Amino acid sequence: MRPQTRDLSPRNPEMSLYGSRPSRSPIYPAAVYHCDSPEQAELRLSGKEPGYVYQRDKHPNAQLLGEKCRQLHQAEVAYVTSSGMAAISTATISCLAQGDHVLLSNRLYGQTCVLLEREFSRIGIEASQVDFLNEAEVESGIRTNTRMMIVETISNPTLRIADIAKLANIAHSAGARLLVDNTFASPAVCQPLLLGADLVIESMSKIMNGHGDLMLGCLCASQQCDPEIRDRLASVLAVWGFASSPMDCWLAERGLLSLFPRVATASQTALWLAEELLSAPQLKEVIYPGLPSHPDHDLAVAEFNAGVADPHSAPQPMFGHMLTFRLRGGPENASRFIQSAREIPFCPSLGETMTTLSHPASTSHRSMTAEVRENLGIFPTTIRLSVGLESPDFILQAIRKGLVDLDF
Ligand SMILES: Cc1ncc(COP(=O)(O)O)c(C=O)c1O
């Protein structure tokens, strides 16, 4: 006889909510779901009938979060992945095949370049980099086999802005798709699909979740992205094992509730800080897209917040939470600044509730030669700030403490 176990499945009335509707999503950590019959299993696994079978294929928390991302980007479909890199992998694996070429902006996140240049070259996909700020260079970088172009809305750490509509036109005329990494902007600031991009990814490990306590990514596709690719995204995500954790999805859904007010506050503070820092004699350069002196300021005004219709959105354009400056003097000033600006942790990530700083030359851009870095405008004394939710005065005082003892 089979041993009797207490049935704690959700079908058990003991576990029902008696019709009550919770105001927040439940968490469904189940790795696997019961099937009533082989026919039902077949229908669910083939996607002909809604429902869940195995967490790696799909699960309710990823779908709840994915639907929020879809709405934020006004996308046709959206999927949640285990990290931002998993979202980039899902997009590129779905769109590229052996013999294809992908054109990369020369200002991309380093790991994206490693994936496309080092890993993909082993499976016969070519990649090359050009300056995406230079239209002629982009045009001449296109090859007959170019199937994808990849750019970031706001680049790291010099905060240059991609002209998404123009790049989408170039990609489409060449029969390629434009993938935009929108991590530094978030959908609160920019929605690249509305500007013509085919695919957009976000590292939700950053400002979208905003609390620095999880790793996730999301991948959204526009209506113009062909149905074959849109369907393949879900399959690639499942079979390559890029699925997300239900717990992380639930946390990110909570983080998203405050996305707009968080980005609005951080953007306002970042603009104020940038304006204040312009007169600091210790700084050689202050970079913020909201400053009229920024080389892409007009483009940022035109592109940012264009399609945002959120009750929390700020009346004036938001330019994001990232702010970069360059100290005067020698490389030792970077260490001095970091030691003295103690209230701002040196924490090479971004998008948390607290302000953090990074030193690109020794972290995100350390694998480049000094010459390549300098050509991109990254110097040994370049400091990148991810502005948080503290009072603007607190952050300014913390920066000023860092500037006091510099030699220049
Ligand atoms: C611009 C950008 N894109 C993608 C990623 C990758 O995201 P994740 O760390 O969630 O894989 C990062 C991570 O720092 C990033 O800065």
Image: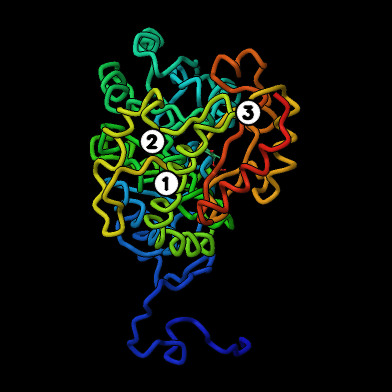
Residue position for label 2: 290
**Frontmost residue, 382 versus 157:** 382
Residue sitting at x 40%, y 26% = 293
> What's under tag 3, amino acid-wise?
Leu
Q: Position of residue 350 (x, y in %)?
A: 56, 45
First-in-chain label (3 vs 1): 1
> Visible in this render: residue 359?
yes
**Image height check: is 391 above or below 12?**
above
**Frontmost residue, 193 versus 408:** 408
Q: Which mark is residue 267?
A: 1
**Image height check: is 59 above or below 18?**
above
Q: Are marks 2 and 1 in contact (CB under 8 Å)?
A: yes
Q: Which mark is residue 327?
A: 3
Which picture quadrant has residue 221?
top left
Gap between marks 3 and 1 measured at Cα? 22 Å
Gap between marks 2 and 1 measured at Cα? 9 Å
Q: Quadrant of ligand 1?
A: top right
